Image (cartoon, coloured by chain):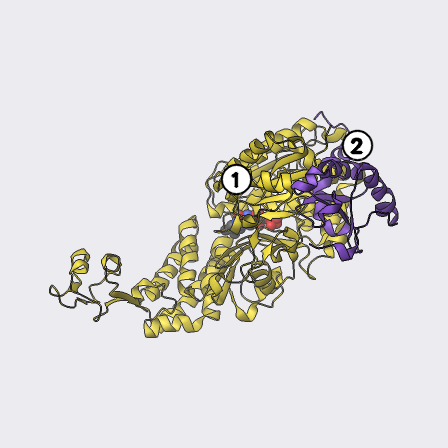
Chain colours: A purple, B yellow
Amino acid sequence: MSKIKSLSDLRKLREELKSSLELRENAESADAVVQVKIGMATSGIASGAREIFNFFAEELPKRRIKAIVTQTGDMGYKYAEPLVMITIPGKDSVVFGEVDIKKADEIIEKYIKEGELVNGVVPKSYQTI
Amino acid sequence: MTKINQHILTCGGTGCRASESKILAARLKEELKDSEISQNVKVVESGCFGFCEKGPIVKILPDNTFYTQVKPKDAKEIVEEHILKGRKVERLLFRDPNTNELIDESKSMGFYKKQIRIATRNCGFIDPENIGEYVAREGYEALGKALFELEPADIIKTVKDSGMRGRGGGGFPTGFKWELTAKSESDKKYVVCNADEGDPGAFMDRSILEGDPHSVLEAMAICGFAVGADEGLIYIRAEYPLAIERLKIAIKQAEDVGVIGDDILGSGFNFNISLKYGAGAFVCGEETALIHSMEGLRGEPTLKPPFPAERGFFDKPTNVNNVETFANIPAIINKGAEWYASVGTEKSKGTKVFALAGKINNVGLIEVPMGTTLREVIFDIGGGIKDGKKFKAVQTGGPSGGCLTEKHLDTPIDFDNLLAIGSMMGSGGMVVLDEDDCMVSMAKFYLEFTVEESCGKCAPCRIGNKRLLETLEKITNGNGTMDDLDLLRIQGGVIKDTSLCGLGQTSPNPILSTLDNFWDEYVEHVEENKCRAGQCKSMLKYVIIEDECVGCTACARVCPTGAITGNKKEVHFITQDLCIKCGACMDKCNFESIELIA
Ligand SMILES: Cc1cc2nc3c(=O)[nH]c(=O)nc-3n(C[C@H](O)[C@H](O)[C@H](O)COP(=O)(O)O)c2cc1C
């Protein structure tokens, strides 16, 4: 790091550095941020879950949404993998199935940002964890 | 570039390092190196998480998984199962000792629920060796604000209004001390950070310095600007090598980026910080003794006034504050006096860091708002007494403090309340005692410590404490009389009234408070020659169980004083007057036919 020569330089530097701690800070206030859980058991990974995981992990901070993206093991209802569970603070969790990049983008833009449900929700009655 | 989406935090504090946490961190990095997602995971060696009982701790973020007692050999499984597949490693999760429940994330641990972290806000969160992480957490913002947006008088007013009181033990209002130093006229002034931390069992200051050294450096510079000092000294005991190393790294980094040193942030204000090492004498934590030790003189106290704020290091005005006091300052400047004053009780604002030790389930470091009750600390956060035993007392304030009992459990903890019930806050050590602890022995332990640590300058402390200890030993040896119990109070009173410094003025406290709260136990020692906890050796009797003894003679042969008699193949006998209670006979006996009775 080079010399910081003024208070405004310090503040600029902080803004740049903030992203490196964002993940930890969001985790600290887990109940107040959007939680995204991706099923990453072997079958989930085989169906492309890692790609979806990376997409959420990269895009959410980019789009300035405070969220924590975690992986979890088997989520059940394997027929619909990759599975993504979204929990918006104060709301019940919703599970989306057969999520690809396009769907993931739609989930962020519509459901997370606007609260509007999109197609692909795995109905509760089928959820057998 | 792929983005980092998981952080693995390991504890890099002294406690966990002693259990190989450094090797563990290296192992984790190694395991990750060969994995397909090595680019997405970051391993951070942070400071103390506080949950020392079950260290080394590994915390995985963002899911807040909290692994305990992790060994280097567990690194492979954590990476392969948790990091790669999202499956928690159950055997490393924390199991609540009271409910037997497996807890998979730190947020739902009773230990953390009631804590509020201000002084330790960055401990166990950032990498203490990376100034960038400190800056990202508003680090040096308070200093910047102080230099460019506030006048020294504003800073002092903020600290005063916050209600901050010194965490070094005395609870002196910090803002008033700064004002006093600011008003002292001189061509040179100093800011000193007291990192001597001499209380047995205390490690709050060490953990702050190891986990967040920049918070202390930043606060010292703010203090320097407020009081008109351009030089800071940190007096730290040489037994704290890791804290020293982290401070050195922090000072170097802070100088390199220009937040410590000359012309800080282009403001024209200079403030340099250096370290001074102590040899770990308790009395050198007393501020005047500390200053003399730094001057190269004997670590002996001198009478106050003059206060260091008027005449301190090399006779120049010197503002001495404790590590934890300083660690609070940047938060107070950033968030304001009102915010800080909203936490705590009427006369004790903010939080206090405590080191929990003794017979408690969750030994460790905690930070709670002032006003939290002892019950909440011991039972909710501390998880209650070990092995289902009964709570007996809690010792607060170290060698200067006292013992509190069941009836004090619902007292809200603050400076004044603790004094009112015969103990004190001290620096924040809290030792929990159970039914197996003897209160007279406990008082003796602390007094032995003060006798050892007395500098010898004044007679009441040097000689008085020795006499006091002799009286106490007479009692624990089973030779005490009821008059001796009165004598303890008389001797204690004189020592308190006439000693030169805080060491002697408080050294009788552990005895006086146990006399008040555990009078019956003292009387039992004197009148019945009985120690109910079985800790006073001289009151115990080794006896041979007649039905069990086979007359093998092993005990008689090993007894160093010839106290055991008996013929071969006949029951043996111990002559109590000759027995020195060494226990050699009991160790030697193969038939478990020797017992110890109270
Ligand atoms: C025997 C004795 C030991 C002390 N040890 C310490 C210590 O280890 N650390 C500390 O900060 N203050 C210690 N103090 C208190 C200091 O004298 C001083 O009051 C304190 O450092 C001031 O800082 P504060 O106002 O921030 O609490 C001790 C006092 C006495 C009498």
The percent coordinates of residue B544 (x first, y second) are 22, 67
The percent coordinates of residue B240 (x first, y second) are 50, 40
**Is A46 left, or right, of B525 in this rendering?**
right
The percent coordinates of residue B356 (x first, y second) are 53, 55
B413 vs B447, nearest the viewer: B413
Secondary structure under tag 2 reads: helix
Q: Is residue B212 visible?
A: no
Q: Amino acid at mark 2?
A: Lys
B434 vs A117, nearest the viewer: A117
* Residue at 60% from the left image edge and 68% from the top image edge: B410
- The crowd level at tag 2 (other Cα within 10 Å; few <14, some 14-19, many 20+) is few
Asked where in the image residue B438 lies, by quadrant, the reply is: bottom left
Q: What is the number of the mark on residue B265?
A: none
Asked where in the image residue B578 lies, by quadrant, the reply is: bottom left
Residue tagged 1: B21
The percent coordinates of residue A95 (x first, y second) are 77, 50
Spatial CA distance of label 2 from label 1 is 35 Å
- The crowd level at tag 1 (other Cα within 10 Å; few <14, some 14-19, many 20+) is many
Residue tagged 2: A12
* Residue at 45% from the left image edge and 69% from the top image edge: B515
Secondary structure under tag 1 reads: helix
Asked where in the image residue B372 lies, by quadrant, the reply is: bottom right
Residue contact between numbered discs 2 and 1, judged by CB atoms under 8 Å? no
